[in-house]
Amino acid sequence: MKAKKIDHLMTGVIYFMSGVIVVILAALLIYIFVAGIPHLSWKFLTSSAKSFQAGGGIGAQLFNSLYLLILSMLVSIPLALGIAIYLSEYTTNQKLANLISSAIEVLSSLPSIVVGLFGFLVFVVNFHLSFSILSGALTLTIFNLPLLVRSITDALQTVSLSQREAGLALGLSRWETVIHVIIPECLPGIITGIILAAGRVFGEAAALIYTAGQSAPPLDFTNWNVFSLTSPLNFMRPAETLAVHIWKVNSEGLIPDASAVSAGSSLVLVAVVLIFNLLARYLGGKLYKHLTGE
């Protein structure tokens, strides 16, 4: 009887701990939505920001955030996937594998402000990329690699050894087994890792202050010349992201409606991350069913 009471007690403690996480998340979301919804409008989402006047929007900042997210993930995902495949499938030198794993752990513990300063010194100063979307994307690649590599490696290692042996028994090479057997099987785990990394990229501010810049030049969305400063596709232009804009508005306090802009921007930031997560999970499930024939 005593063992049953202890079991019920510990089960209740676990449920309580899980409920605390849900309550904290719900409270944050409710606060952000209640504070931000009154300031949300189509004009706010599409108009340009104001430096000293009320009534500015976040059109350029929202686009910059999405554009930088896409560029950084285009660089991060192939690198992380290659490193994870090597660590999980190809490594025979355990000392080298331990060295790579240790480097990944150290990178994951670096504060984002340190990564931002490193990106500033390397990409902005030494590589002469200036404050630009490209500098920010390359810096976020360094910031993002540890989480992506760990997530993809863990996903690859969930595939049983028998499936690897079955692929090799059918005459597939090791690489073909990885591409046609292992990756399709662990695709949901890989998608989850990518989602987590993308959420960090979208909400990152400290690393981008010193690399992507704190200004957003006026954008002409009819200008598709990537070499033009006003073209939205120009990745060599400075770009203030949504997270940096929230920090800048609150720290400078130069516009009369700073609290309204901050609340509306925070709501958009959270909403975009939620939408991206749901959409990515849906597409990941569809892709998994297509690759596995379920």
Image (tube, grey):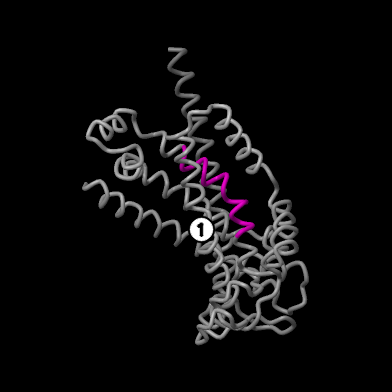
Q: Is residue 166 left or right of residue 199?
A: left
Tell me what residue is drawn at x 70 percent, y 48 percent.
111
- Say which of 61 and 121 sits in front: 121
Tell me the chief SS of the magenta region.
Answer: helix
Is residue 142 covered in magenta? yes
Q: Is residue 238 left or right of residue 3?
A: right
Tell me what residue is drawn at x 58 percent, y 80 percent.
227
Q: Quick one: SS at disc 1? A: helix
How far across and how far down the image is residue 129, in percent? 68, 67
Tell me what residue is drawn at x 32 percent, y 32 percent.
164
How far across and how far down the image is residue 75, in percent? 52, 57
Q: Could you say which quadrant of the image residue 264 lies in?
A: bottom right
Magenta range is 138-153
The residue to which callout 1 is attached is 73
Up/down of 137 relative to 7, above or below = below
How far across and how far down the image is residue 22, in percent? 51, 46
